[in-house]
């Protein structure tokens, strides 16, 4: 296909960021937006230049001209919306966290394979060049054998209504902590021997902040902190036998700085120029659709399921389930 005709499901803030990104991409067409409110869809379409505006999600799902639908609804709705889209023959790029739990994620990915349609998780850092740069730096031995990893991601999100609501699968873990787990996965892989964790809950019944410690069979360890009530440095640091490296902003790797045993800077890698960072996942989806694939190699279904299983294991240790799981 010359241009990928994209539909956006929802008109919230993250959908707006995607629309701004799509508007700057030459290989993409802003085809449609859908909201449960026709007025909101019309306003969004006019602001960003979409050709069509639908007042229901089902109308857009039925439009066969849509090549890819970007799902930006609350996490609690991802499973039902993605399945509805797949049943209607649409390829899907679904925001993270991909689903409420691994069971939902398995249902979603199984349906995409059954229908022969693309389903990809919009874990944008997985698609970015900087993720590969980090792996290459570690593989080069620049910091020797890496043994310890720390990652901190915290935002001031208590004023965001959906983040505080259990019925919308709110809380820090699925929205913020998923990035710390992804960072550890990119650096240390997914062969895990243990997970330990502690949590502080909000008065509304979701996780406000937590710490997760992951152990690996080869002696490595990751310590991951996430919060929706405290602002963090967003750094990921990996410590090795010959030095360490610092990643600025694990939510969108801005730079990687390498230090030797004397704590002297020996190398720095800066983020390539980008629109927003979302363009990488969109182009990966376009390529996968053109090649008839059901998943993107940068973020395969197996990786989505592993991270969902890790978050399930963390919540099991907390004794925490969302209302829709009970």
Image (cartoon, rainbow, N blue to C red):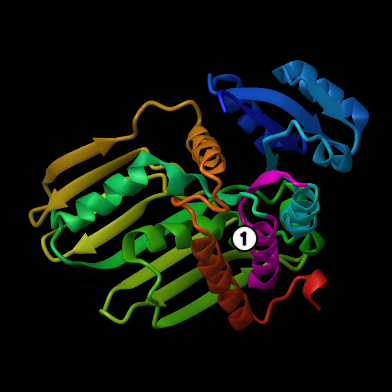
Q: Is residue 210 visible?
A: no
In terms of depth relative to the viewer, which is nearer, 207 or 6?
Answer: 6
User: What residue would you read off at disc 1?
Assistant: 174
Instruction: Decide: is 198 above or below 241.
Output: below
Image location of residue 243, percent across then percent down: 14, 58
Instruction: Decide: is 3 above or below 310.
Output: above
In terms of depth relative to the viewer, which is nearer, 106 or 12?
Answer: 106
Residue at the image point whose x is 38% and y is 75% from the top: 191
> Is residue 102 covered in magenta?
yes
Image location of residue 96, percent across then percent down: 61, 52
Give the left or right position of residue 98, taking residue 277 as reference. right
In terms of depth relative to the viewer, which is nearer, 120 or 287?
Answer: 287
Q: Is residue 117 visible?
A: yes
Q: Please provide the residue range marked out in magenta.
A: 89-115
Instruction: Decide: is 63 above or below 296.
Output: above
Residue at the image point whose x is 61% and y is 70% from the top: 200
Residue at the image point whose x is 42% and y is 74% from the top: 213
Image location of residue 102, percent across then percent down: 63, 70
Quadrant placement of the C terminus: bottom right
């Amino acid at each position: 296909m010359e241009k990928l005709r994209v539909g956006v499901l929802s008109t919230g803030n993250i959908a707006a960021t995607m629309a701004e990104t799509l508007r700057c991409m030459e290989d993409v067409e802003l085809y449609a937006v859908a909201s449960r409110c026709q007025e909101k869809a019309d306003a969004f379409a006019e602001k960003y230049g979409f050709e069509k505006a639908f007042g229901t999600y089902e109308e857009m799902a039925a439009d066969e001209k849509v090549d890819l639908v970007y799902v930006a609804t609350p996490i609690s709705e991802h499973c039902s919306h993605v399945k509805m889209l797949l049943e209607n023959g649409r390829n899907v790029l679904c925001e993270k966290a991909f689903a409420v739990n691994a069971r939902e994620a398995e249902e979603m990915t199984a349906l995409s394979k059954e229908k022969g349609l693309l389903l990809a998780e919009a874990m944008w850092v997985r698609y970015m060049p900087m993720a590969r740069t980090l792996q290459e730096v570690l593989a080069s031995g620049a910091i020797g054998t890496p043994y310890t990893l720390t990652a901190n991601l915290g935002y001031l999100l208590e004023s965001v209504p959906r983040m505080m609501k259990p019925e919308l699968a709110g809380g820090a873990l699925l929205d913020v902590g998923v990035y710390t787990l992804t960072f550890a996965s990119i650096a240390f892989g997914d062969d895990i021997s243990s997970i330990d964790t502690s949590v502080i809950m909000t008065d509304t019944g979701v996780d406000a902040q937590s710490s997760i410690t992951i152990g690996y069979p080869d002696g490595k360890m990751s310590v991951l902190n996430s919060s929706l009530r405290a602002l963090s440095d967003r750094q990921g640091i990996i410590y090795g036998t010959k030095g360490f490296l610092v990643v600025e902003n694990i939510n969108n790797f801005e730079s990687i700085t390498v230090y030797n045993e004397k704590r002297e800077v020996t190398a720095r890698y800066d983020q390539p120029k980008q629109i927003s960072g979302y363009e990488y996942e969109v182009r990966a989806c376009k390529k996968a659709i053109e090649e008839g694939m059901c998943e993107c190699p940068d973020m395969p279904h197996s990786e989505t399921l592993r991270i969902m299983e890790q978050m399930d294991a963390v919540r099991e240790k907390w004794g925490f389930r969302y209302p829709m799981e009970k």
